[in-house]
């Protein structure tokens, strides 16, 4: 049992009126009255706590499914009261390294009613984590004591890549293949025949099917879609550069989210998708195959992988792909670039893929560098040393961005596609770029 604020206030009240009693009567009588008051009050508090036990609330934590890294995941409890009104405080035993809001839940529940309580947890690591028991406090009927106990609810919970983002992306891709979104797509996108539909204002007259038009006595146009069963290979770097923290997550985690988003998009478009993860060697190789069922295999295979403090062997990774894949394919390298000199091996490795393959270099930029490069150097209230420090930080950030641009310019000159985007936006921009490549038939 834990004393409540009301009990402490009543005890302080007894101590406050004790000097008044001593003035009216005498010191001895004052002490006797104070001791009797405290005894009665403490007895009532103990009884208040004891009477809570048979009227405890029933608390059940909803099953903890797969959690998504870097996302707000809801953890929900169902609280059911007994015949008495319940005033409770609840705290879950979650992993201490995760961000939680709010850490403590409270509620007032009417008799024989139920209520759901939810807190939000944002994991910053993947893997298996231990959830412990649930700590509960319930206030007594006289509000003098909290009755405290714990509910056994220990379990292992897996934190996966961004599954929430994958669900949203799958809905978007499904909508783009059906309904008004599909009907509003430009007809000339793609090379494979999909269907015939009536000519509409603004449609390309070159797509009119004259034979079908003659048979139906109304103008019909051919709907062309991007070619399917092409090959997409994603190479994900897990070397030293991918261990850096960006926006609360490791750069590798952002890259892994982008890898799965791109794989989902490729599979939904009927392409064969393969994935390789490498550092000094290709540690994981999943050959290209098609079919929506492949996504779950990719998630399960890639989730346990962590970045390592080793320099990546880009030439070795590219050589592995060349040996495994003889047909033309889009090869996406997800990594990061420092400058022309430090990333020389990456540049030469990607250049070797042209013109047989279509190489695509995707780099994950730190948004903090952009912020520093565009920050105001001088403020009205800044001290001299603060202005010097701000100017230096901005100069370094601008230099880093310029060095990256030099490396990207060389890649483009050699026929390599390039996408450089903030790490927290890379998944969306990569998917959009891939769909553009499909629509333009660059594969």
Image: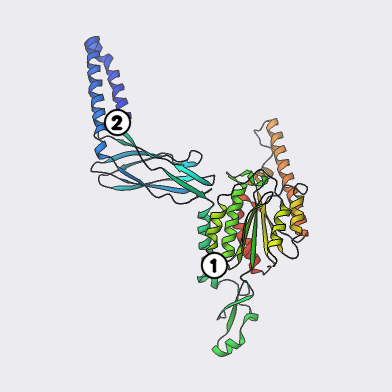
Image position, residue 12 (x, y; %):
31, 22
Alpha carbon of mark 2 to alpha carbon of mark 1: how far? 59 Å
Instruction: Give the left or right position of residue 405, taking residue 151 as reference.
Output: right
Q: Which mark, by number, is residue 89? A: none
Q: Residue 425: where, in percent of width, then height?
A: 60, 53
Identify the element where label 1 is drawn.
helix
360 or 12: nearer the viewer: 360
Q: In front: 115, or 250?
A: 250
Please identify the quadrant where the N terminus is shown.
Answer: top left
Q: Residue at x 54, y 55 (%)?
A: 299
The residue that mark 2 highlights is 145
Q: Quadrant of residue 6?
A: top left
At a point 25% along the width and 46% down the height, the residue shown is 112
Please state the horizontal and vertical placement of residue 95, each as a whole percent of the image. 47, 40
Quadrant position of the C terminus in the picture: bottom right
Few, some or many residues within 10 Å of mark 2 (<14, 14–19, 20+): many
Badge 2 element: strand
| The image quarter in which residue 197 lies | bottom right
- Read off the residue under disc 1: 176
């Amino acid at each position: 049992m834990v004393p409540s604020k009301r009990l402490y206030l009543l005890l302080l009240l007894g101590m406050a009126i004790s000097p008044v009693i001593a003035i009216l009567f005498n010191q001895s009588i004052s002490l006797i009255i104070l001791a009797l008051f405290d005894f009665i009050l403490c007895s009532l508090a103990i009884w208040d706590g004891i009477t809570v036990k048979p009227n405890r609330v029933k608390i059940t934590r909803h099953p903890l499914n797969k959690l998504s890294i870097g996302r707000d995941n809801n953890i929900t409890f169902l609280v059911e009261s007994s015949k008495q009104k319940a005033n409770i405080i609840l705290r879950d035993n979650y992993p201490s390294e995760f961000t939680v809001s709010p850490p403590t839940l409270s509620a007032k529940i009417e008799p024989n009613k139920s209520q759901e309580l939810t807190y939000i947890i944002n994991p910053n690591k993947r893997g298996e984590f231990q959830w412990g028991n649930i700590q509960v406090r319930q206030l007594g009927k006289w509000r003098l004591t909290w009755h405290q106990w714990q509910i056994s609810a220990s379990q292992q919970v897996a934190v996966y890549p961004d599954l929430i983002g994958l669900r949203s992306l799958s809905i978007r891709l499904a909508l783009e293949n059906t309904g008004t979104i599909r009907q509003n797509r430009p007809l000339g996108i793609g090379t494979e025949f999909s269907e015939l539909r009536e000519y509409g204002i603004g449609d390309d007259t070159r797509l009119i099917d004259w034979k079908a038009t003659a048979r139906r006595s109304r103008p019909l146009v051919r709907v062309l879609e991007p070619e399917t069963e092409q090959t997409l290979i994603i190479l994900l770097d897990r070397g030293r550069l991918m261990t850096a923290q960006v926006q609360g997550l490791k750069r590798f985690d952002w890259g892994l989210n982008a890898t799965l988003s791109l794989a989902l998009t490729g599979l939904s478009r009927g392409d064969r998708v393969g994935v390789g993860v490498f550092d000094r060697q290709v540690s994981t190789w999943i050959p290209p195959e098609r079919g929506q069922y492949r996504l779950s295999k990719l998630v399960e295979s890639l989730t346990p992988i962590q970045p390592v403090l080793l320099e990546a062997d880009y030439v070795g990774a590219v050589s592995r792909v060349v040996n495994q894949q003889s047909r033309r394919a889009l090869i996406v390298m997800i990594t990061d670039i420092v400058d022309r000199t430090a990333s020389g091996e990456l540049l030469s490795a990607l250049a070797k893929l042209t013109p047989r393959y279509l190489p695509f270099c995707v780099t994950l930029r730190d948004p903090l560098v952009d912020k520093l490069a565009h920050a105001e150097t001088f403020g009205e209230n800044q001290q001299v040393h603060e202005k010097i420090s701000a100017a230096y930080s901005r100069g370094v950030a601008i230099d880093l961005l310029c060095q990256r641009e030099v490396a990207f310019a060389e890649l483009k000159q050699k026929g390599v596609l390039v996408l450089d985007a903030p790490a927290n936006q890379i998944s969306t921009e990569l998917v959009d770029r891939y769909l553009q490549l499909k629509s333009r038939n660059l594969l």
